[in-house]
């Protein structure tokens, strides 16, 4: 009669492989194709949102210089309002991109990362990766 597979105490999941061949940091992740595609989409979206935030924050110094130029040389209220509107749209884009980036990172952590409870040793100290 076959032996029952060893189970983890915390999660009740089966151990994969002999215990002497596994480190305590080893974990198999069995993801379906839909989960892998979603994880890939999350990573791509986070990269896109991070790029948008980076580009929009790089545009702020040029917009400030444009504002100073319009204020000093043209002095027109319409041009002044246009530059201020551009600056406001740029900052709103930056804040939106940063928020979306953080949401993507949070979803990736919740759905695909190893939770801290599984990384903790028996004495309550986080595992060191050395």
Image (tube, rainbow, N blue to C red):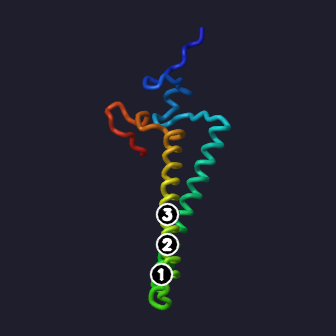
| C-alpha separation, residue under disc 2 versus residue under disc 1 | 9 Å
x then y, percent, for residue 130: 42, 46
x then y, percent, for residue 87: 49, 72
Label 2 crowd (10 A; few <14 / some 14-19 / many >=20): many
Name the residue at the front extreme.
77
Per the image, the residue denoted by label 2 is 87
Please report whichever mark, 3 or 1, sits nearer to the chain's N-terminal start. Answer: 1
Instruction: Mark 3 and mark 1 in contact? Answer it, CB < 8 Å.
Output: no
Label 3 crowd (10 A; few <14 / some 14-19 / many >=20): few
x then y, percent, for residue 107: 52, 44
Tell me the residue at 53%/39% (across/down).
Answer: 111
Which is nearer the eye, 125 or 105? 105
Tell me the residue at 49%/40% (across/down).
Answer: 110
- Snapshot quadrant of residue 30: top right
Per the image, the residue denoted by label 1 is 67
Tell me the residue at 51%/58% (across/down).
Answer: 96
- Which element type, helix, strand or loop, lies under badge 2? helix
| C-alpha separation, residue under disc 3 versus residue under disc 2 | 9 Å
Name the residue at the top extreme.
1
- Which element type, helix, strand or loop, lies under badge 3? helix
| C-alpha separation, residue under disc 3 versus residue under disc 1 | 17 Å
Please report whichever mark, 3 or 2, sits nearer to the chain's N-terminal start. Answer: 2
Instruction: Mark 3 and mark 2 in contact? Answer it, CB < 8 Å.
Output: no
Instruction: Mark 2 and mark 1 in contact? Answer it, CB < 8 Å.
Output: yes
Q: Is residue 6 above or below residue 28?
A: above
The numbered disc on residue 92 is 3
Q: Is residue 120 above or below residue 45?
A: above
């Amino acid at each position: 009669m076959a032996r029952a597979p060893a189970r983890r105490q915390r999660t009740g999941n089966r151990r994969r492989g002999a215990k002497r061949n596994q480190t305590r940091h080893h974990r198999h992740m069995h993801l379906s194709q839909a989960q892998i595609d979603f994880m890939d989409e999350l990573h791509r979206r986070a990269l896109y949102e991070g790029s948008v935030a980076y580009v929009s924050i790089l545009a702020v110094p040029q917009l400030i210089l444009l504002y100073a130029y319009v204020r000093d040389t043209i002095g027109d209220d319409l041009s002044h309002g246009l530059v201020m509107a551009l600056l406001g749209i740029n900052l709103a884009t930056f804040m939106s991109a940063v928020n979306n980036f953080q949401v993507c990172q949070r979803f990736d952590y919740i759905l695909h990362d190893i939770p801290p409870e599984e990384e903790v040793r028996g004495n309550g100290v986080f595992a060191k990766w050395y």
